[in-house]
Image (tube, helix red, strand yellow):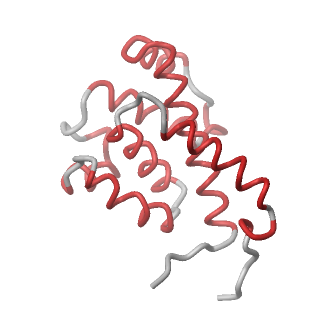
Amino acid sequence: MQKRIDISGLQTKAIEAMMGLENYVSGSELPTTLKELIKLRTSMINNCAYCIQMHTPVAQKSGIDVQRLMALAAWQESPLFSDVECAVLAMTDEMTLIADQGLPEATYNRCIELLGETATAQCMMQIVTINAWNRIAISTKMEHAS
């Protein structure tokens, strides 16, 4: 594999801005388990191995067991996720695949109903942030140190 650019070295101000966004979502009031489900589901959709490898141990440490992690690939068919988690995972799928149908009213309204406006906005920002990280990692072919 040909070595690609190191964005963090070439675009330090951009990465600092991304880290500001990351610090915002990390500091939000959302439960860590919900944040990690968003990060992993988004990374699965985007085929971002780097982020999946990074967030799987964090998800496990936050209390998400292996069975739920494995079921995340087929969350729509799994009884292992709560109503709130299902609503957020639907929003995650739809925002990650935004060109397919946008964010349908039904999903948006369900999230507002279950989470309220503030937590829904925080989930949206988590989805946007991990999508941006996925795109950086995939485009530059980031790899974990062996």
Relative horizontal placement of residue 48, taking residue 7 as reference (left or right): left
Q: Name the quadrant containing residue 79.
A: top left
Question: Which residue shows up at 63% across the image and 37% down it?
Answer: 98
Q: Which of the image's four quarters has the C terminus?
A: bottom left
Q: Position of residue 4 (x, y in %)?
A: 73, 79
Question: Relative to residue 121, is residue 70 depicted above or below?
Answer: below
Question: Which residue shows up at 59% across the image and 48% down it?
Answer: 131
Question: Relative to residue 40, is residue 7 depicted above or below?
Answer: below
Q: Position of residue 66 (x, y in %)?
A: 21, 57
> Between residues 122 and 139, which one lies in front from this camera angle?
122
Question: Which residue shows up at 51% across the image and 62% down it?
Answer: 47
Relative horizontal placement of residue 111, taking residue 142 as reference (left or right): left
Q: Which of the image's four quarters has the N terminus?
A: bottom right
> Between residues 127 and 110, which one lies in front from this camera angle?
127
Question: Which residue shows up at 75% across the image and 70% down it?
Answer: 9
Q: Name the quadrant containing residue 23.
A: top right
> Count the marks: how many?
0
Question: Relative to residue 41, is residue 77 depicted above or below?
Answer: above
Q: Which residue is at the far bottom?
A: 1
Relative horizontal placement of residue 74, taking residue 15 as reference (left or right): left
> Between residues 145 and 107, which one lies in front from this camera angle?
145
Q: Position of residue 51 (x, y in %)?
A: 49, 61
